[in-house]
Image (cartoon, rainbow, N blue to C red):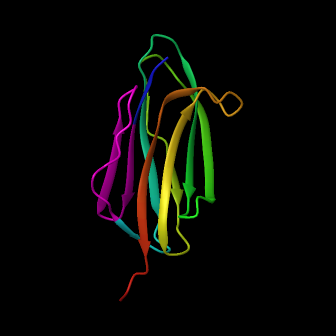
Amino acid sequence: MRIAIFLAFVVAFGASMAYAEPVSTEIPSGEKTHYVDEQIMIVADISNNQDVPQNFAYITQVKNDQDIVISLSWLTGSLSPRQSFSPAQSWVPASTGTYHIQVFVWESIDNPEALSPPLSMTVNVNERFS
């Protein structure tokens, strides 16, 4: 079973992206600065490349620079054969710092069999000065 995922972190008018083939993961070369109390949308395009339906759990995890999980969210669903879907989870950083965002696509929450390699990105969060 193969699920292809594309991950984008979108804020205001800018975007930073990471892309993974079904068997590899790449971390983007550029970094984007985000701001405290500014919503970050964690968006992935997932595709069922099979000829059979595929259940999935889309999980997002945010860790601070001490490797402590500060946000964990998920949604579950099923993709028809050859269907694509773009789930999104939002996160609003409450303080400045460096954060590590990870996205996992599993068979289910109860069955953590990876359907695609995990993706990750580091984001910097600063205070916005007027």
Q: Which residue lies most toward the bottom here?
A: 130
| Image spot of residue 114 (x, y percent) | 55, 28
| Image spot of residue 91 (x, y percent) | 53, 60
Q: Vertical placement of 96 versus 48: above or below? A: below
Q: Vertical placement of 4 versus 37: above or below? A: above
Label count reads 0
| Image spot of residue 85 (x, y percent) | 44, 33
Q: Which residue lies most toward the right here?
A: 110
Residue occupying the point 49% across, 62% down = 99
Q: Vertical placement of 112 versus 8: above or below? A: above
Q: Is residue 66 or residue 21 the one in the foreground?
A: 66
**Quarter placement of the C terminus:** bottom left
Q: Vertical placement of 122 versus 107: above or below? A: below
Range shown magenta: 6-32
Q: Which residue lies most toward the top here?
A: 51
Q: Is residue 124 or residue 105 the one in the foreground?
A: 124
Is residue 20 a member of the stretch shown in magenta? yes
Is residue 29 a member of the stretch shown in magenta? yes
Side of 110 where 30 appears, left or right? left
Residue occupying the point 50% across, 19% down = 80
Q: Is residue 21 or residue 13 the one in the foreground?
A: 21
| Image spot of residue 41 (x, y percent) | 45, 55
Side of 8 where 64 appears, left or right? right
Residue 49, picture quadrant: top left
